Amino acid sequence: MDTIRTVLVPIHGEGWRFIAFFAVATMLLFLVWTPLGWIGVVLTTWCAYFFRNPDRVTPQRDGLVVSPADGIVQMITDAVPPPELDMSDAPMTRISVFMNVFNVHVNRIPANGVITALAYHPGKFLNATLDKASEDNERQAVRMTTDQGKDIAFVQIAGLVARRIMCDLSTDQQVSVGTRFGLIRFGSRVDVYLDDSMTPMVVVGQTAVAGETVIADDKADEPAREGQLN
């Protein structure tokens, strides 16, 4: 039974209607021409794979910030948080995690705390790897105060083919690190804006796992890490 659970990863509820659509289309393609039907099988399998929703084991310690998304740490830079969140105009450390179409797209809460502001901003659908995507693209921004009293933010950003951002949070909601809160389909990015006291624990190019990879530490007594490609 444990083996079955390991192989059959749960599917996010948002995905079932897409899987059903691909499955019906596949049956029709088989009626038209068998090779087309097998292409449909591949696409249906990919659709199920895209909407997978695996469990994660989240580190539990005060001051830790975990990745809200699966993907590659694309950039670590100083940037002003989205103006709609009414945070400081001073630049904050921003860690950007880029999700391609093969990553898990279920997003998770980066720290324990309370949601203090939510803001949706319509925009473009530029390539999410571009720096200007943080300002120009459609996004859902979330501001929160951690249990340590630090203001941070995380932002779901639509990408080149992403056309839907889901966020199930509400203002004044108490949240726990690593819990699921939303989904972006189909290729996108999540930015995390850190308090000055938080030291980045990841490097550009590193693979992050949502709900598991520690991206920053409020209690670290070491400088930001450096990495080397091997």
Image (cartoon, rainbow, N blue to C red):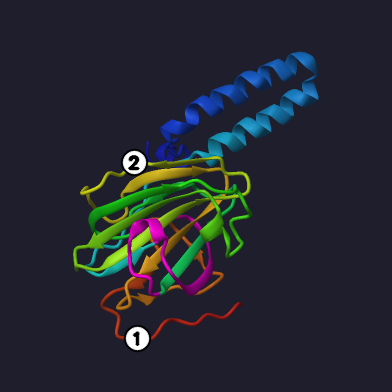
> 50 or 142: which is nearer to us?
142
Measured Cα–Cα span from mark 1 to mark 2: 35 Å
Q: Is residue 35 left or right of residue 89?
A: right
> 42 or 154: which is nearer to us?
154
Q: How many marks?
A: 2
Mark 1 sits on what residue?
222
Which of marks 2 and 1 precedes in the sequence?
2
Q: Which of the 4 image quadrants contains residue 2?
A: top left
* Above or below: residue 118 compared with residue 111: above
Which image quarter holds the C terminus? bottom right
**Which residue occupies 59% across, 47% down?**
101
The magenta-colored residue range is 67-90
Q: Residues within 10 Å of mark 1 (few under 14, many from 20)?
A: few
Quick one: which residue is furthest to the top in this view? Answer: 31
Q: Which mark is residue 168?
A: 2
Which amino acid, mark 2?
Answer: Asp
Q: Residues within 10 Å of mark 2 (few under 14, many from 20)?
A: few
Q: Is residue 92 visible?
A: yes
Q: Is residue 68 magenta?
A: yes
Which amino acid, mark 1?
Answer: Glu
Q: Which mark is residue 126?
A: none
* Above or below: residue 6 compared with residue 207: above
Whole-percent x and y of residue 67? 40, 61
Q: Which of the 4 image quadrants contains residue 1?
A: top left
Q: Is residue 132 left or right of residue 141?
A: right
Whole-percent x and y of residue 97? 50, 61
* Above or below: residue 31 compared with residue 228: above
Q: Is residue 68 visible?
A: no
